[in-house]
Image: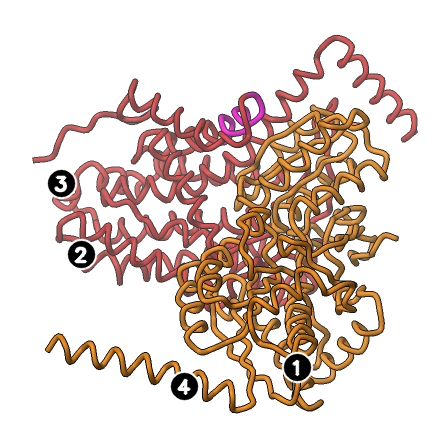
Chain colours: A orange, B red
Amino acid sequence: MRRFSWIVTFLAVLVFIFGSVISSTAGEIKVGLMGPMTGAWASEGQEMKQVLELLVEETNNQGGVNGQRIKLIVEDDGSDPRTAALAAQRLVTQGIVGVIGTYGSSVTEATQNIYDEAKVIQIANGSTAIRLTEKGLKYFFRTCPRDDEQARVAVKAIKNLGFHTIAILHDNTTYAKGLAEEAKRLLEKDDTVKIVFFDALTPGEQDYTAILTKLKGANPDAVFFTGYYPEAGLLLRQKKEMGWDVPFIGGDATNNPDLTKIAGADAAAGFYFVSAPLPKDLPGEEAKKFLEKFAKKYGNPPNSIYSVLAGDGFRVLVKAIEVTKSTDPDVLADYLHNKLKDFPGLTGKISFNEKGDRVGEVYRVYRVNEKGEFILLP
Amino acid sequence: MLESDAASEAEAALFLRCYGRGLMAEFLQQFVNGLAVGGIYALIALGYTMVYGVLKLINFAHGDLFTIGAYLGLTLLTSFGLADRVGPGVAVLLLVVMVMGFVAVIGIILERVAYRPLRNSPRLSAVVSALGASIFFQNAVMLIYGARFRVYPQNLLPKISLNLLGIYIPLVKILVLVVCVIMMVGLYLFIQRTTIGTAIRAAAIDQEAARLVGINVDGVITLVFIIGPALGGLAGLMVGILYGQIKFTMGWIYGLKAFTAAILGGIGNIPGAMLGGLILGVVEALGSAYISIAWKDAIAFCVLILILVVKPTGLLGERVAEKV
């Protein structure tokens, strides 16, 4: 009985190996997409899928890569680390060369080791937590910037706008707290800006007047809020009702059109936030052509920059396969780390450093105008 | 005229600051902030305390009736364009009446479906049924309105703030506080001065004895499930008008705080719920002002624990002899 099960296992492994060899010689390159198709971030994941399907179709219509067609395999990570680990395991058994995704940092983190052990190139598109690239994983890359980069840009903006005293407010989530502490560290190195307030609010409440009154007592030139848009919207609205006209600055989690709806255009006006550029503000011809095609196929331009960043992940992977004429993960990783320089991506020039982080400044500063529109500052 | 007003106001503010009374202004501002939140807690707490008083049941679905009130107000305002048809002042009055009426109907149905069949079952069954009703309502709201934040129209009431020597009080907040106080005083008088109120109090003390003297206890329970949900729904509407942003999960945190307020004041006791709500709101505001914002909830619950250690029945609660 025992021997029998050994034989079965052996046969299964054999079939699997032959199966993957056959499929890779059949002129098809498999690329995975792991994204949040359901759950809290479903709108992000569904747009990531739209972007990748468009790009795959385009590549295949132009004859594929090195004469081989690309096949996209989509798995749902459910916006949840546990679901994502299962999705990653399903993907690595299907003989993919690389995987694009995913959005949330904690979700990506749950899958990093699975892909690393299977030697699959992973290019994340929205996971900005610093520690993801600090583990020395050879096959992990990301097209989005890191939170310390965001803090740097925010601090630079604070100085450029001429604020001398600043209050920092976060909401105790991993992302917001990390960003707030990084900004605090950078500001403390510097004598020109003084931090007069540093505390956290409880997200999900509705009355923030007590916090605002306390903030007002500290009398800062500006307030840097690193949390998410629902709280930012309420803070702006209640600040306006208090008759306090201090400027607010937000992190990229405040980049959502609902911010204006919650605060009202008059209270949101004058709010600054740091974010990767919105799709509508992407520079360059590549981006313009892509946005047109996207709008033609789906009826509206992409809403989220992170879906476009997923598209960039796919494009650098295809580029690497094309140039190296290989699907060997070590060759591809080496190419992406060392040889890819200033690739014309949809979101600007792309190069990776030895950690797999994207090199160069991606973050921009936005200001909300009187109509509640998000305007890119030069 | 306006300029000189502003100038004299600035002077007055300066004067106050010079004499170290800016701190006083901040304290008063925080006190007012706390009162507004506390008024809403109190309004919701009334529903918990009335149901507990008569049925000895914690109605966990009460927080979700509050959410339904908020969403119903939104529907009336946006889908029916109530404000455009009758003008903002009348619209708010109509909203109050319609939301209270509709949520009261849901309250009656809730009692019939989820609680009445379990009237003579062990108390735990009714609590489980209440939790089930809560999950049902929350998900129903999510399926109907979606999981994202919804926003009340901005221009419903004029955005005016009163400025009393450096203390800013938005007009909307005063309105909400006034409505809360009217409702609470009205309810108190109704319970204390009318025959029906006396019947409710009698049923709360002893249902069997109340039945013996000819009180329709089922009628009393239905009435409690009209008044409580109506006030909860009204609180939801107030939150919508006051803060503008509503979500299907909002009933949970407000429900929890209001429940805390009801226990703080002594559960089953109507003036206690009002007092508990106001105290909780003020403690939260002052705690976050002078200790730490992040510890706001911890401070509120510490106060609850302290009060219960010193006085286990709550502030105004009385020890009721165990029924035989």
Residue at 88% in and 53% down: A378
Dot in front, 4 or 3: 4
In contact (CB < 8 Å): disc 2 and disc 4: no
Question: Where is residue A312 shown, x and y percent of the image?
Answer: 69, 69
Q: Residue A19 got which mark?
A: 4
The residue tagged 3 is B209
Q: Which residue is mark 2?
A: B118
The chain letter for the residue carrying disc 4 is A
Question: Vertical placement of A164 versus A294: above or below?
Answer: above
Extent of the magenta region: B281-290
Amino acid type assigned to the residue bearing label 3 in the image: Ala
Determine whether the residue tagged by mark 3 lies in a helix, strand or loop.
Answer: helix
- Residue lying at 23% horizontally and 39% vertically, measured from the top left: B204
Give SS at disc 1. Answer: helix
Q: Mark 2 vs mark 3: which is more N-terminal? A: 2
Residue type beneath disc 4: Gly
Which amino acid is tagged 2?
Answer: Leu
Q: Is residue A375 left or right of residue B278?
A: right
Q: How many marks?
A: 4
